């Protein structure tokens, strides 16, 4: 690297690192190589942590991978639409998303974090969030303890709880009108996939029954510390107009889970564990299909057929 190029990198780093953190939104110098841009990105992140003053080590057992690219953090927060009032952030870690969330006018923000080091970190440097940082397990939390009215959910979700987390979103679907989250690309694609895809599964059907889901963008491993072994994906869920399904919703969940539990088999075989009068629908075309060939509406119709044909005592 010649001295002129080095000087150019130094100036770029100064502009992006030592100016206020809001400058993270400034575009990168397109003349820099990928290596040089990565160097600048890492320098910005380490300056951010040094400024905060407390170092937090990522815990493998908590599935922590801290996002280091502040421009991606800004992009994730900007994906909240419309601009929300009540927001819950899950797994804030060192506040890489939090720093942009607190800039939203009139936001009512609460943080849920299970890592004690991260909680200490956040309490020490987000004074405006005093009494709004909860040292709790999101999966075990009664969300109505935090909000009694609808709220948006956002986060760089811990990889080891992304599936259970979205089952909880389904459980609180009438209170969570919007979710913006980063998780493993495989799980993000599964949630957003439609019929005909190998990724289409239980979460796809359950969530798409009540949400419009959009896969927003992919995030590479090198922008995390430590880098995960997989790519990540950012998705957005927006509540649709469905208030309730035209079938028994508890039975709907049982039917969907039973069918995808044996996804390689015809639905006729998967339904053996569901008690109902099977002879009544023995000739229906649904029973010859495999799970990925069924739309959300098909699953609803099948549930109604099962509901309307109980076992005769």
Image: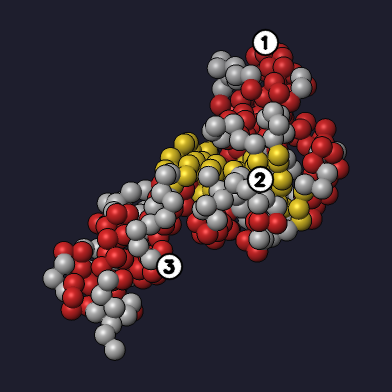
Q: Which residue is label 1 attached to?
A: 4
The location of residue 168, given as percent across then percent down, is 55, 58
Callout in the foreground (3, 1): 3
Q: Work out whether residue 302 or residue 36 is closer to the camera in this orientation and state it.
A: 302
Q: Secondary structure at mark 1?
A: helix
The residue at 61%/35% (across/down) is 84
> Foreground: 3 or 29?
29
Total numbered labels:
3
The residue pinned by badge 3 equals 250
Q: Residue 138's quadrant in the figure?
A: bottom right
User: Which mark is in front, 3 or 2?
Assistant: 3
The residue labelled by disc 2 is 89
Does residue 5 sit above or below 309 in this rendering? above
Q: Specify which label sits upstream in the sequence, 1 or 2.
A: 1
Tag 2 or tag 3, which sits nearer the N-term? 2
Q: In screen coordinates, is 212 left or right of 34?
A: left
Q: CA distance from mark 1 to mark 2?
A: 43 Å
């Amino acid at each position: 690297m010649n001295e002129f190029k080095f000087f150019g990198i130094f100036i770029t780093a100064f502009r992006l690192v030592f100016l206020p953190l809001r400058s993270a939104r400034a575009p990168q110098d397109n003349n820099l190589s990928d290596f040089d841009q990565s160097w600048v990105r890492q320098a910005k992140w380490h300056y951010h942590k040094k400024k905060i003053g407390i170092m937090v080590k990522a815990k493998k057992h908590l599935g922590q991978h801290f996002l280091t690219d502040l421009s991606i953090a800004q992009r994730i927060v900007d994906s909240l639409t419309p601009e929300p009032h009540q927001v819950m952030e899950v797994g804030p870690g060192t506040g890489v998303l939090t720093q942009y969330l607190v800039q939203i006018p009139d936001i009512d923000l609460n943080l849920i974090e299970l890592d004690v080091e991260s909680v200490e970190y956040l309490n020490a440097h987000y004074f405006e969030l005093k009494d709004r940082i909860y040292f709790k397990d999101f999966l075990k939390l009664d969300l109505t303890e935090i909000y009694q009215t609808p709220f948006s959910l956002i986060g760089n979700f811990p990889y080891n709880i992304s599936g259970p987390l979205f089952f909880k979103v389904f459980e609180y679907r009438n209170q969570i009108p919007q979710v913006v989250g980063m998780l493993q690309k495989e799980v993000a694609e599964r949630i957003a996939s439609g019929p005909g895809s190998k990724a289409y599964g239980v979460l796809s059907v359950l969530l798409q029954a009540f949400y419009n889901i959009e896969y927003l963008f992919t995030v590479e491993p090198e922008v995390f510390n430590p880098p995960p072994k997989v790519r990540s994906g950012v998705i957005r869920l927006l509540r649709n107009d469905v208030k309730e399904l035209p079938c028994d919703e508890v039975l709907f969940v049982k039917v969907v889970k039973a069918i995808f539990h044996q996804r390689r088999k015809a639905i006729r075989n998967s339904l053996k564990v569901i008690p109902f009068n099977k002879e009544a629908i023995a000739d229906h075309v649904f029973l010859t299909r495999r799970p990925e060939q069924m739309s959300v509406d098909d699953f609803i119709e099948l549930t109604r057929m099962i509901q309307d044909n109980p076992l005769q005592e």
